[in-house]
Amino acid sequence: MKTITPNLILLFLFSFILFSCTKEDSNDYPSENIKIIDIKVSYSPLELEITNLIQAHRESLGLTSLDVLNIVSGVAEGHTTYMIEAGRISHDNFEQRVLALINYVGA
């Protein structure tokens, strides 16, 4: 009985690792119609405060500051609209959003 229990635990852990980290097929998701629109985004006081805290932290570490890109915020808002319309929180079409930003702004 002592050898069965550790073997079952190892089998369970191996199965968990093998099947829990599989790559999702992005073709399973409805198209999000990702649009890259460079518009002026209005940031809330909380968003500005968080940005300032991040910039101050980076400065304290000797790192360069980050640029706030309205384009990235616009893509995020577009995905938020998509999730509201779908009625669920998701990472659907993540690869398409990333590729769109890489191609448009070199993010």
Image (cartoon, rainbow, N blue to C red):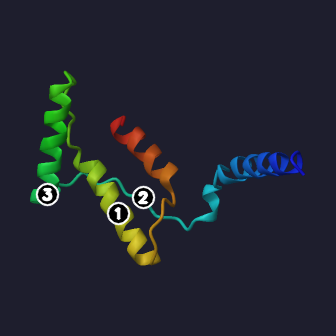
Q: Residue 2's x, y, as percent?
A: 86, 47
Q: Rounded to the nearest whole Å, what is the CA distance between mark 2 and mark 3?
A: 26 Å
Task: Give the mark nearer the N terminus: 1 vs 3.
Answer: 3
Horizontal and vertical percent position of residue 44:
13, 60
CB-based contact (under 8 Å), mark 1 and mark 3: no
Disc 1 marks which residue? 78
Residue at (38% x, 44% y) in the render: 101
Q: Secondary structure at mark 3?
A: helix
Q: Quadrant of the C terminus?
A: top left
In this view, which residue lies farthest toward the left? 45
Q: Residues within 10 Å of mark 1 (few under 14, many from 20)?
A: some
Along the line of sight, the residue nearer the viewer: 52 or 68: 52
Q: Position of residue 42 (x, y in %)?
A: 13, 59
Give how far apart the Cα atoms at labels 2 and 1 are.
7 Å
Please report contact status of discs 2 and 1: CB closer than 8 Å, yes or no.
Answer: yes
Q: Which residue is mark 2?
A: 34
Rendered position, 88 above or below 60: below
SS for tag 2? Answer: loop
Is residue 36 found left or right of 43 in the rendered image?
right
Query: Residue sitting at 65 percent across and 49 percent down?
Result: 21
Q: Nearer the viewer, mark 1 or mark 3?
A: 3
Left or right of 8: which side holds 52?
left
Residue pointed to by mark 3: 46
- Mark 2 and mark 1 lie on one chain; the one further toward the N terminus is 2
Could you tell whether 17 is left or right of 67 in the image?
right
Q: Earlier in the sequence, mark 2 or mark 3?
A: 2
Callout 3: few (<14), some (14-19), or many (20+) C-alpha neighbours within 10 Å?
few
The amino acid sitting under disc 1 is: Gly
The image shows residue 38 at horizontal and vertical percentages of: 24, 51
Crowding at dot 2, Cα within 10 Å, few <14 / some 14-19 / many 20+, comes out as some
Near-viewer residue (18 or 65): 18
